[in-house]
Image (tube, helix red, strand yellow):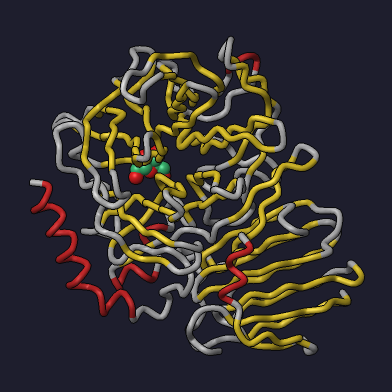
């Protein structure tokens, strides 16, 4: 069963390879599905020196379905190898999807925790938190479910993130309470196989906190600069001022997890990204001690079915890796240093019009003043009156749509453009805007207007020799 399913997926990759790689919107330096649909990053880890990125993958369609775990490895997070499929939805406990999860190393082995998703014929959903193990980091053996659904949650219970603290293992699971409020459930274990419930560490309407969504997906608890930070992707928030304009959000709560009482005291929710396409991020700590984040550069919204890459049998990508730091109660995100290896043809730009398709820019502002940048006549970044706005064309209406954030001044922009994506880092990662956009493939024109004085350095990235 497993072999047949995996073979079917490889056949699909082979069948559509030419179509996929010749798509003018195929990206040059981002991780993408070889065919079909990619969503969340999963199982991020540096194992025996090698970086592993797994991802939610439907090889058969460009819609959501019974997910596989696709797999890429790298020595430097720049050059990637496509590895054999890690997990396929082949067993009674995961037959409708090997859903999102995480990786840990123990006794020199790589363990994957994931959600086995099962849908019965009458539409009811079952969820099993499952384990798989590998000696070499490439071939995985499924060990089956290690945690059943506790009775005080609905079957929207998924995305186990496991970590070690002192001699204990902990697992955070994204959950929905019986009152249909989003929450994070915590479990602990001595051996990775036997799990005990520790409590609910955060949730919508909990501990006097306001209502905050009907489901929380993809929790991730990390330690940054002496604080515990819970990353989570809540569903069901209404827009509020400049916030929560995407269908679903991803952000974080800063606090302290009391491991004895299993209580997490935390502050308010801050969004991680201010653009259009960012969801379900996950982090890992590498051997150098950096906390590195990958997000899904996409989201399940009404525009998903209108992505122009679908005609060429693929959809979505992951973000570039970002290093996280916590300063003054805020997460700063910066592209990892290794990405400098992609840089070619450095140019100091001294005009207001120049070209770029797959490129990086660093713009240092000598004096803050209003400006407007046009990216290939299809997306626009502007700053005025302490507001930074990104506009792009909506794939359904063809009108420009915008996302805005308040920021006192803009002293630096670091911009990663790829053939159909923009990742814009403001003031060394104080804010980030991530977006897909689909310009005319031949239009490479970038122009800057306004009174701002700046120094601009540009590199071409990838292999198209701009
Ligand atoms: C988030 C998510 C997860 C789930 C996975 C399924 O995008 O819905 O909660 O595990 O995607 O692909």
Which part of the image, by quadrant, shows the C terminus? Answer: bottom right
Nearest the viewer among 213 and 335 is: 335
**188, 461: nearer the viewer:** 188
**Image spot of residue 307 (x, y percent):** 40, 65
* Quarter location, residue 37: bottom left
From where the camera sits, is residue 249 visible?
yes
- State the residue at coordinates (43%, 19%): 187
Q: Position of residue 314 (x, y in %)?
A: 32, 66
Ligand 1, image quadrant it occupies: top left
Q: Would you identify the image quadrant in which residue 149 lies?
A: top left
Where does residue 164 sit, x and y in percent of width and height? 49, 29
Does 444 appear above or below 5?
below
Closest to the observer, 216 or 325: 325
In the image, taking residue 111 as reference, residue 245 lies left or right, namely right
Which residue is the extreme one toward the top? 261
Instruction: Say which residue appears at 74% left-offset and 52% top-offset.
Output: 430
Determine the residue located farthest toward the front in the rendered image. Answer: 107
The answer, for residue 402, to whether it is visible in the render is no
With respect to residue 80, does 213 lie above or below? above
> Which is more toward the observer, 117 or 43?
43
The residue at 49%/36% (across/down) is 235
The residue drawn where x is 58% and y is 68% is 339
Residue 98 lies, in percent from the top left, at 27, 41
């Amino acid at each position: 069963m497993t072999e047949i399913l995996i073979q079917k997926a490889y056949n699909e990759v082979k069948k559509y390879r030419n179509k996929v790689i010749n798509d003018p919107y195929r990206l040059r330096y981002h991780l993408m599905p070889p065919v079909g649909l990619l969503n969340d990053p999963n199982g991020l880890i540096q194992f025996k020196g090698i970086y592993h990125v797994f991802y939610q993958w439907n090889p058969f369609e460009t819609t959501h379905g019974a997910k596989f775990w696709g797999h890429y490895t790298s020595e430097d997070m720049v050059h990637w190898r496509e590895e054999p499929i890690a997990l396929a939805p082949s067993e009674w406990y995961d037959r409708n999807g090997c859903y999102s999860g995480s990786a840990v190393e123990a006794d020199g082995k790589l363990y994957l925790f994931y959600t086995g998703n099962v849908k019965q014929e009458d539409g009811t959903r079952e969820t099993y938190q499952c384990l798989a193990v590998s000696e070499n980091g490439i071939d995985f053996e499924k060990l089956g479910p290690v945690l059943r659904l506790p009775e005080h949650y609905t079957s929207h219970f998924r995305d186990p993130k496991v970590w070690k603290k002192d001699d204990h293992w902990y697992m955070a699971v994204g959950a929905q309470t019986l009152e249909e409020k989003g929450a994070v459930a915590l479990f602990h274990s001595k051996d990775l196989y036997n799990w005990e419930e520790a409590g609910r560490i955060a949730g919508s309407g909990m501990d006097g906190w306001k209502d905050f969504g009907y489901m929380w997906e993809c929790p991730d608890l990390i330690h940054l600069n002496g604080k515990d930070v819970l990353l989570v992707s809540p569903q069901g928030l209404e827009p509020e001022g400049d916030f929560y304009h995407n269908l679903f959000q991803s952000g974080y709560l800063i606090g302290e997890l009391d491991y004895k009482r299993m209580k997490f005291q935390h502050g308010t929710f801050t969004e991680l990204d201010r653009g259009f396409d960012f969801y379900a991020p996950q982090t890992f700590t590498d051997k150098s001690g950096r906390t590195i984040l990958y997000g899904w550069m996409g989201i399940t919204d009404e525009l998903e079915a209108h992505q122009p890459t679908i005609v060429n049998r693929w959809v979505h990508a992951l973000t570039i890796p970002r290093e996280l730091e916590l300063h003054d109660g805020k997460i700063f995100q910066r592209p990892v240093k290794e990405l400098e290896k992609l840089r070619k043809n450095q140019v100091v730009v001294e005009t207001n019009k120049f070209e770029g398709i797959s490129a990086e820019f660093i713009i240092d502002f000598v004096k803050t003043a209003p400006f407007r940048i046009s990216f290939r006549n299809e997306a626009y970044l502007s700053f005025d009156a302490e507001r930074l706005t990104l506009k792009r064309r909506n794939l359904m209406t063809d009108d420009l749509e915008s996302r805005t954030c308040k920021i006192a001044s803009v002293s630096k922009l670091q911009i990663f453009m790829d053939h159909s994506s923009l990742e814009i880092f403001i003031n060394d990662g104080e804010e980030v805007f991530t977006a897909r956009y689909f310009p005319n493939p031949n239009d490479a024109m970038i122009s800057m207007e306004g009174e701002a004085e700046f120094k601009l350095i540009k590199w071409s990235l990838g292999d198209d020799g701009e």
